Image (cartoon, rainbow, N blue to C red):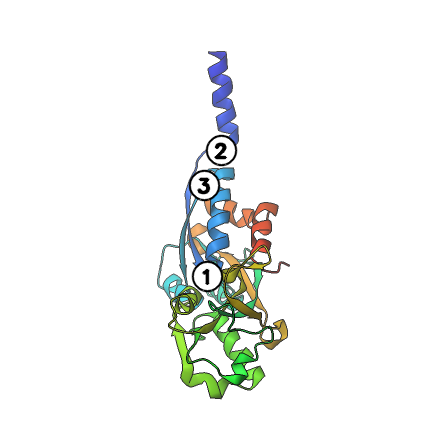
Amino acid sequence: MKRILIVALAVALAFPARSDEVQVAVAANFTAPMHQIAALFEKDTGHKAVLSFGATGKFYAQIANGAPFELFLAADDETPARLEKEGQGVAGSRFTYAIGKLVLWSANPELVDGKGEILKTGNFRHLALANPKTAPYGAAAIESMTRLGVLNKLQERFVQGENISQTQQFVVTGNAELGFVALSQVTKDGKLTAGSAWVVPADYYQPIRQDALMLARGKGKAAPAALLAYLKGDKARAVIRSFGYDLR
């Protein structure tokens, strides 16, 4: 009997008194790292993160219309700030969990040069990018092409994705020879996973500060609070760094 009580006590200490789920809206560029973080989070806390991935602008519309999300991991800092101001988020909960990087990428290992000169030579038919109205990485792509002076010349070649995941798929499937995606989608531990790429200089576009926000539906609940805290911890930050993001 004593042995059974000891085992029961150990189990009780290893997990929270009540395990729960947290509904999380996650920017598409953060798909791979968030899957890893969610698995670690569940292992360490017992809480389960239920993840939905998509474009930040579309998530804003869904949250404003009552979607049952409790946490929002956006691809920018403006959208969470707007939701907080409008009363859809918990005041004081917002923070930058990652700083994203833009890359011009092709599945063809010979296509993209190390300086992005292919954008000027135009030796391709189609260029993929995310919708700049709803996806911050798409807006960063427009800024970068404007800086390079090639925007007007290339506009007729655009293949536009609803979010950064669909944009990458356009390149993977050959619907576009190259495209602007998030560095996190094509690198791991500092190495390119496939193809060829040019990391766009950070001063070509506004910093992609990606903010997390506790939404009104998550206020006072254990699982959302636990995940928000977990994102600030060493394990989550190590995962985020491994996918090429900068941290504050």
Pointer 1 or 3: first along the chain: 1
- In three-dimensional space, the C-alpha distance between marks 1 and 3, rounded to whole angstroms, equals 21 Å
Q: SS at mark 1?
A: strand
Which amino acid type is shown beneath numbered disc 2? Phe
Which of the labelled discs sits on residue 59, or is there none? none
Q: Is residue 117 above or below residue 197?
A: below
Q: Nearer the observer, disc 1 or disc 3? A: 1
Pointer 2 or 1: first along the chain: 2
Circle 2 Cα neighbour tier, 10 Å, few/some/many (<14 / 14–19 / ≥20): some
Residue where numbered disc 3 is placed: 47
Pinpoint residue 88: horizontal percent, then vertical percent: 44, 60
Q: Could you tell me if residue 221 is visible in this image?
A: no
> Mark 2 near mark 1, Cβ–Cβ under 8 Å?
no
Q: Is residue 68 above or below residue 168?
A: above
Q: SS at mark 3?
A: loop
Pinpoint residue 75: horizontal percent, then vertical percent: 50, 64
In-image side of 22 versus 97 (left or right): left
Pointer 2 or 3: first along the chain: 2
Circle 1 Cα neighbour tier, 10 Å, few/some/many (<14 / 14–19 / ≥20): many
Q: Residue furthest front?
A: 110
Residue visible at 50% across and 57% down?
213
Which of the labelled discs sits on residue 15, or is there none? 2
Residue visible at 42% across and 64% down?
165
In-image side of 247 versus 44 (left or right): right
Q: Nearer the viewer, residue 174 or 84?
A: 174
Q: Is residue 135 above or below residue 90?
A: below
Which amino acid type is shown beneath numbered disc 1? Ala
Pinpoint residue 142: horizontal percent, then vertical percent: 50, 79
